[in-house]
Amino acid sequence: MARERDRRLRRGGRRGRRPKVCQFCSGELEITNYHDDRMLRRFISDTAKILPRRRTGVCAKHQRRLAMTVKRARMLAIIPITEMLVRK
């Protein structure tokens, strides 16, 4: 019993997690072009990697389009290809 309760709590409680909704499908955001670096930075990590769908909640169709847009912005140096990592 205790194991089952612990497992359930680790997964997100009794109710579970709220399903992520694609911001592009709902009309909250729009992939207009690669010049909007503030919008694109929401979908890249601090090391400048493209975040996965499971983390951002974007649908597959828009994730492919978002990846293409980020890559175009990288080619034109609007957003960085990688962030400099300082190792101690």
Image: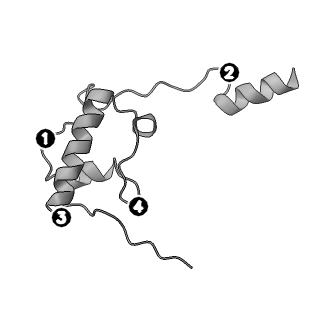
Identify the element where label 3 is drawn. Answer: loop
Q: Earlier in the sequence, mark 3 or mark 1?
A: 1
Label 2 vs label 4, nearer the camera: 4
**Badge 1: few (under 14), some or many (20 or more) residues near its Cα, within 10 Å?**
few
Q: Please tell me whether residue 38 is drawn above or below residue 68 in the rendered image.
A: below
Q: Amino acid at mark 2?
A: Arg
Q: Identify the mark nearer the N-term, 1 or 2.
A: 2
Instruction: Tell me the distance, in whole angstroms, between the alpha carbons under discs 1 and 2.
Output: 39 Å
Indicate which label's residue lies in the foreground, 4 or 1: 4
Q: Relative to 48, is 28 above or below?
A: above
Residue receiving disc 2: 14
Q: Quadrant of residue 62?
A: top left
Taking the spot 70% from the left edge, 33% from the top edge, the residue there is: 10
Q: Quadrant of the N terminus?
A: top right
Mark 3 is on which residue type?
Ala
Gap between marks 4 and 1, in whole Å? 24 Å
**Where in the figure is residue 21, as x and y percent of width and height?**
38, 26
Mark found first going from the N terminus, 4 or 1 = 1
Mark-to-mark CA distance, 2 and 4: 34 Å
Q: Residue at x 45, y 39 (%)?
A: 55
> Which residue is under mark 3?
77
Disc 3 from disc 1: Cα separation: 18 Å
Mark number, residue 47: 4
Mark 3: few/some/many CA within 10 Å (<14, 14-19, 20+): few
- The mark found on residue 32 in the picture is 1
User: Are the residues tagged 2 and 3 within 8 Å (C-beta)?
Assistant: no
Which color scheme did the rendering employ for the protein? one colour
Is residue 61 something one can see in this rendering? yes
* Nearer mark to the viewer, of 1 and 2: 1
Please give left or right for residue 3 compared with residue 46 in the image: right
Q: Position of residue 50 (x, y in %)?
A: 35, 49
